């Protein structure tokens, strides 16, 4: 049983340590670790928490860590109290590297942040983070989120339509993402019940 | 006035009122920390934002830790970090506890069947925006493509990609710096 907690801690510590690129960059890591590697969340559950995170206060990293920590323990068959401990473990593990790193930088490394060498590291990371995000997008395009033309052609068609509509809505029409999610939810209720 | 409690409360307030993500917190942080409390100057704030953005980890936490440390060293950093993380933690925990009971409701299931593809779009759109901001051109576009394929098709862990990209950037920088000093000597 302790294994899950230790695993949660190590995983989210790594995510906190290597999660470059803000919330979105971290999303790729979280997706890979919680869904692909450890199977703590299904793809659908992961997508759900991204949706919920858009509509609730707070950074997506913290929201995902809290939700995943809870769900991982809960799905393993434990009750609310242990699951809450799981969410606390994951969230604590996520913020710990930031705390340590930022304090170290404040104390000693502030003057190195602007050197060309450090800047070139960040320059190298930038295109990679784009790739990470693209991979996360691709990994979320599966039958849990969209169904398939064979299994449920209606859901597949509507899902693709919603994808395109949301992309146009937030990409070109600059509609607030929260509103788009609400529209999509209503569409789901009306069309996919 | 207890500075720990003050900074905790300020960042708790900032944490509660921002929807959608770390960067949305910036105007609120500026209002509270720079204008009202004057814990950092406007210029310092810009530097902090730049560093916090480049470093790994949750952006909001990075900023909170910086400011907290400046106010009161390690304990100050802990106070602001907890303040920032706590609202999200409590709200999501509540949702997690109750969501598990709602998930089987057929209406809720239908709503989320609609929401999920929309969320994929909400991640796809920033991917393109990030690509634009990274100033990718036809010489550099292979980098995100290779990274994405490695993760999606080959199952490579994004952590390895990050490490390799950081090392590549470092190596690239080393070569450039050497070249600069060589031309200067001429």
Image (cartoon, coloured by chain):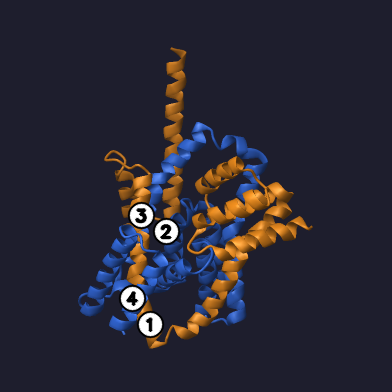
Chain colours: A blue, B orange
Res. A151 visible in picture: no
Q: Nearer the viewer, residue A188 or A74?
A: A188
State the CA–CA distance, disc 4 to disc 3: 21 Å
State the CA–CA distance, disc 3 to disc 1: 28 Å
Decide if residue A193 is on the left or right side of residue B186. left
State the CA–CA distance, disc 2 to disc 3: 11 Å
From what the image shows, is residue A26 above or below residue A38?
Answer: above
Could you say which quadrant of the image residue A8 lies in? bottom right
- The tag on residue B114 is 4
Q: Residue at the location (42% across, 28% down)?
A: B176
The residue carrying mark 2 is A28
Q: Nearer the viewer, residue A171 or B138?
A: A171
Question: In the structure shown, which secondary structural element does the residue marked by tag 3 occupy?
Answer: helix
Q: Residue at the location (50% across, 57% down)?
A: B24
The location of residue A115, given as percent across then percent down, is 53, 33
Res. A67 visible in picture: yes
From what the image shows, is residue A162 above or below residue B151?
Answer: below
Question: In the structure shown, which secondary structural element does the residue marked by tag 1 occupy?
Answer: helix
Question: In the structure shown, which secondary structural element does the residue marked by tag 4 occupy?
Answer: helix
Question: In the structure shown, which secondary structural element does the residue marked by tag 2 occupy?
Answer: helix
How many numbered discs sit on the rendered protein? Answer: 4
Could you say which quadrant of the image residue B86 lies in? bottom right
* Mark 2 or mark 1, whichever is nearer to me: 1
Q: Nearer the viewer, residue A63 or A190?
A: A190
The residue carrying mark 1 is B109
Q: Are marks 4 and 3 in contact (CB under 8 Å)?
A: no
From what the image shows, is residue B91 above or below residue B13?
Answer: below
Residue at the farthest top position: B186
Decide if residue A172 is on the left or right side of residue B161. left
State the CA–CA distance, disc 2 to disc 4: 22 Å
């Amino acid at each position: 049983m302790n294994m899950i907690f230790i695993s949660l801690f190590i995983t989210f510590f790594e995510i906190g340590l290597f999660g470059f690129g803000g919330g979105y960059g971290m999303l790729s890591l979280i997706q890979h670790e919680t869904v692909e590697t450890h199977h703590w969340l299904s793809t659908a559950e992961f997508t759900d928490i991204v949706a919920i995170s858009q509509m609730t206060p707070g950074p997506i990293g913290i929201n995902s860590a809290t939700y995943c920590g809870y769900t991982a323990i809960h799905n393993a068959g434990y009750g609310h109290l242990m699951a809450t401990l799981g969410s606390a473990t994951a969230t604590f593990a996520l913020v710990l590297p930031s705390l340590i790193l930022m304090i170290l930088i404040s104390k000693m490394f502030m003057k190195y942040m602007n050197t060309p060498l450090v800047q070139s590291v960040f320059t190298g990371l930038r295109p990679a983070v784009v790739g990470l995000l693209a991979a996360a997008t691709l990994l979320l395009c599966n039958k849990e989120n969209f169904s398939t033309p064979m299994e449920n052609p209606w859901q597949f068609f509507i899902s693709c339509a919603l994808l395109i509509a949301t992309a146009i809505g937030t990409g070109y029409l600059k509609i607030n993402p929260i509103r788009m999610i609400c529209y999509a939810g209503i569409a789901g209720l009306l069309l996919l019940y | 006035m207890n500075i720990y409690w003050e900074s905790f409360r300020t960042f708790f307030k900032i944490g509660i009122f921002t929807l959608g993500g770390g960067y949305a917190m910036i105007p609120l942080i500026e209002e509270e920390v720079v204008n009202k409390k004057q814990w950092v100057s406007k210029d310092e704030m810009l530097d902090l934002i730049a560093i916090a953005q480049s470093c790994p980890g949750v952006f909001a936490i990075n900023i909170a830790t910086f400011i907290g440390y400046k106010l009161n060293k390690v304990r100050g950093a802990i106070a602001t970090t907890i303040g920032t993380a706590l609202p999200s933690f409590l709200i999501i925990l509540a949702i997690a506890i109750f969501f598990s009971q709602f998930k089987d409701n057929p209406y809720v299931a239908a709503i989320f069947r609609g929401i999920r593809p929309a969320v994929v779009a909400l991640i796809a759109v920033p991917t393109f925006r990030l690509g634009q901001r990274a100033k990718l051109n036809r010489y550099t576009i292979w980098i995100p493509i290779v990274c994405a394929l490695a993760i999606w098709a080959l199952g490579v862990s994004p952590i390895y990609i990050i490490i390799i990209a950081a090392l590549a950037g470092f190596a690239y920088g080393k070569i450039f710096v050497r070249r600069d000093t060589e031309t200067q000597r001429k």
